[in-house]
Amino acid sequence: MNSEYFALSPLDGRYAQIAKKFSPYFSEYALVQHRFLVEMKWLRYFLDCYAEKMNDFSEEEEKKIFTSIEQMEESFSEKSFCRIKEIEKKTNHDVKAVEIFIGEELRKRNLEQFVSLVHIGCTSEDINNISYALMIRGALKKVWLPNAKRLIEKLTKMADKYKATPMLAHTHGQPATPTTVGKELAVFVQRLRWIYEEISRMPVSVKFNGATGNYSAMKVAFPGVIWPNEMQYFISDAFEDKDYSIEYNIATTQIESHDYICSIADAIRHFNNVVLDIDLDMWQYISMEYFKQIPVKGEVGSSTMPHKVNPIRFENSEANVDMSNAILMALSNKLVRSRMQRDLSDSSSMRNIGIAFGYSLQAISQTIGGLEKVAVNEQKLMEDLEKHWEVLAEPIQTMLRKYGIPDAYDSLKEITRGKEISKENIQEFVKSLQELSEDDRRTLLELTPSTYVGFAEEIAEQVIQNTEYC
């Protein structure tokens, strides 16, 4: 039987397709692989710049050594992972297990003279924090941001399609000044785009400075080197990415401060909450029949009511937003705190970053799926607009104010508040306004709820045309 059916987390079971997307970045395998990568890059950099032992080799021999180490760096496999986990059972220390494994591999390649230089000057957190930074950067760049962009693009297309489609607005759940469907969708486009751009600009941050952040051991062993500068050169040389920057944090304790992770977590939580706002609005619009759901052949809406087509994708998204946000908030609250120079509580917390990303992506995917299966019900929109001519009280009283007529607001309030008002009622009232010019009276008489949408279409168009985030 499929092992996914026995998974404890829905991300590893029911939503396994989401987990597969993040597995290259947040799985245990990914973490060990990244640790190996960081260790190997540091070894290669150190040998190239500072290892006196390299002076004993000719140029040709040196080239062979670096070729062998580069090949070793690229050789990480499932077999490598299993061997490291086997070593870890004895060491009970995950980073030390990687160091020992690298030593084994060097000996196999007759490079045992360099074993003592593996992990030189490092504390485990030097390796871990860079590994997590690379994992987070990769997950954002390759998975989360592209899917967030898909949602923005879907909303943008819908906003464009329905930018001129009038819709009765609702404030406090009550009929209000009409708008257009596209303009209301454009509001979400603009909000999500702003957060998307913010996250795209956020750098990851790393440290590489020893046990308490002062490069102390390296200064003693290699006193002629300005290690704060040198480590920044190493990070830039080994890990810089033109599409997603990495910053060097020079002032830390034993651990990198994790402030950048908290910033990213808070920004994703912000994005999630706007997605939730979309879900809630779409759920309400569907219940009001402003949007029709497109039935999918073979799907069942209710086990007892055959007629039902439920907004399950928006509801699924809502639930997964809550799960993602709960974890993101816990991480944001926890990771900024560490007792004095180090405690290990952040290590366990960090292992949950992938889960937060996973639930967020599940929510985004479900919202996209929900949007793909709805269509505007223009007949219902027009019916509701025609039922609520009282919304024209606003432009009428504004026109009366223009003419300096006192108590304009109260006059309209008296005849419209809490009452059913027909087209005829409104037009009779407008015809009685002798203070207005013929042109202004004609403007009000020609106005209908469906045409009283202000610059809604133009606002939507302006948002749609602003595609700089791409």
Image (cartoon, rainbow, N blue to C red):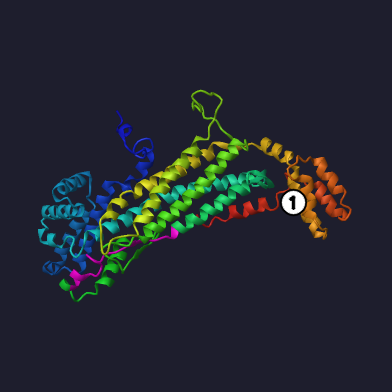
Please, is residue 92 above or below residue 45 in the view? above
Name above or below for residue 98 compared with residue 427: below
The residue at 38%/38% (across/down) is 15
User: In the picture, which quadrant includes the N terminus?
Assistant: top left
Q: Name the element at disc 1.
A: helix
Q: Which residue lies furthest to the right in this view?
A: 434
Say if 433 sits above or below 304 in the image. below
Residue 210 forms part of the magenta stretch: yes
Numbered range of the magenta stretch: 200-219
Residue neighbourhood size for the residue with mark 1, other residues' Cα within 10 Å, grouped as few (<14), some (14–19), many (≥20): some
Q: Residue furthest bottom?
A: 224
Residue that carries the numbered disc 1 in the rendered image:
394
Classify residue 42 by image quadrant: bottom left
Relative image position of residue 305 (x, y in whole percent)? 53, 24
Can the viewer see residue 165 in this picture? no
Observer able to see residue 197: yes
* Residue 67 inside the magenta-drawn segment: no
Can you give x and y, in whole percent of width and height, for residue 307 in the image? 56, 25
**Residue 33 drawn at (x, y percent):** 25, 51
| Quadrant in the rendering for residue 341 | bottom left
Q: What residue sits 50% from the left and 39% below the top? A: 314
What kind of residue is marked 1? Glu
Q: Is residue 340 left or right of residue 244?
A: left
Q: Which of 12 and 322 is in front in this view?
A: 322
Task: Tell me: 75 left or right of 307.
Answer: left
Residue drawn at x 15%, y 63% as measured from the top left: 117
Give the mark count. 1
Q: Where is residue 403 in the image (x, y as percent from the top left)?
A: 83, 59
